[in-house]
Image (cartoon, rainbow, N blue to C red):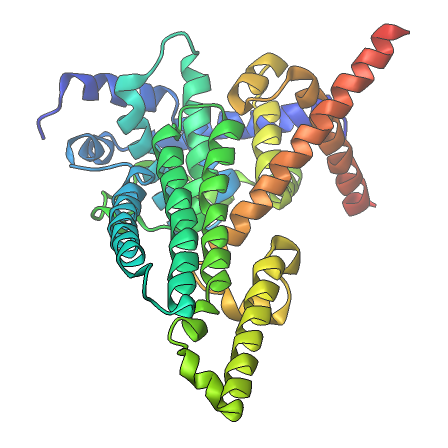
Amino acid sequence: MQETELIELWRSYDRKLEENLILNRQNAAAITVIKIKSTVGSMAPMKIFLIIASTLWLFFLGVVLYRTHAYASPFFWYSIAIHAIIIAFVTGVYIYQVVLIYQTDLSEALFNTQRRLAQLKSSTLLIARLMFLHAPIWTTFSIQERMFENPVWMVVQIFVIVVFAVGALWLFFNIKYENRHKKWFRFIFHGNQWDPVIKSIEMLRELEQYKTSQYESVSASQITSDR
Amino acid sequence: MPLLRDAVQFLNVVDANKGIIYKVANAYCRDKESRKDLVQEITLQLWLAFPKYDEQFMLTTWIYRIALNVSISFFRKQVSRDKINHPLTDEILTLMADGEQLDVDSDLIMLHEFIRQLKELDRALMLLYLEGRSQSEIADILGITASNVSTKVGRIKEQLRQKFTSLKS
């Protein structure tokens, strides 16, 4: 099919729509009087709540760490410190998400808005990775030095720590888009909550492809003009 | 129903550009019921953005941007509006003839099918191309360079040509 035929085909569709499409003004008018909020904006309150809650939690952890520094078990102190560092990173991601939410404008160019929305969604996966990463501390913070007096208990404790640490590190490095079709990935990340996250990463890839072809077309035009 | 002064102006804008809203919704949503919801969502977002409309942009550019952004982002997530706020109204755009009856031409059916098979961003690009928008306007709506538009459109057209040829042979 030639280009002109294609355009003419679309124009014929346009004409048919023109003749048949009617705006129900009453129904459309109803939209202008109902109290509504933007869908993107509606995501912000929950994120802000999480930022406030995690900041308060971090403050509490800071006080605990400061007060117990002199006498607490090093296992407890360092476990809580690692937990606090990771929660601080997670809070940082939530702040980044709120910034993206407030920057999102649907009347902006399609690629800018889609990039922001895709970054917003895909950063949720980073939060999941960070939460997995700090799983081992739940096996270490309650260790008492006297436990090491019992060799059996010590072996069991070390085994549990190693299993959690290896598992957490493995998940942290392997939770990525490339593994989305693997069974373990689908087992953890499935359902309505996670499907949009995976799709948003696909969208980021698609946007990247456009960027690459943009460079290709710019380079091609430069080569042509150089000649 | 009492209308705000801006509402009348807004309804006139929607009426004059209803074809754009319908075509974008139709490209991203085959199912009639879901398409109705998408048209509502687009109209709603247009209304929310209406007071901030910047007249330095063409009205159609502004409408395409919002319609495409809504179609790609919200509808992909299948977020139902009534979960966020409350149920909206009935059908905003009605076709006198059934949608399927409009596609009497088999080539047109194939074309719609082909467009729906494209990736979301490619679909937006092809839709704007078929709408007869200039390269610079497409670049403005999408936020890419005109040369990128040209390269991409060329590639998609070639795919389209091959599809039509293979289906017809």
Q: On the image, which quarter does residue B140 sit in?
A: top right
The quadrant holding residue B129 is top right
**Quarter of the image containing the N terminus of chain A?**
top right
Judged left or right of residue B10, residue A216 is right
Q: Given the current orientation, which residue lies at the most extreme left position?
A: B2
The percent coordinates of residue B22 (x first, y second) are: 43, 34
On the rendered structure, is A90 left or right of A216? left
x then y, percent, for residue A129:
51, 58
Query: How many callouts does the rendering have?
Result: 0
Is residue B143 visible to the viewer in this orientation of the structure? Answer: yes
Q: Is residue A23 at least partly visible in the picture?
A: no
Quarter occupied by the C terminus of chain A: top right
Picture coordinates of residue A143, whole percent (x, y) = 41, 77
Depth check: A222 or B50 in front?
A222
Say which quarter of the image contains residue A185.
bottom right
Q: Residue at x 45, y 51 (%)?
A: A124
Image point (70%, 24%), residue name: A214
Could you tell whether B137 is left or right of B84 in the image? right
Vertical position of residue B13 compared to residue A37: above or below: above
Viewer-closest of A109 and A176 = A176
Depth check: A19 or B146 in front?
B146
Residue A99 spot, x, y in % from top left? 37, 33
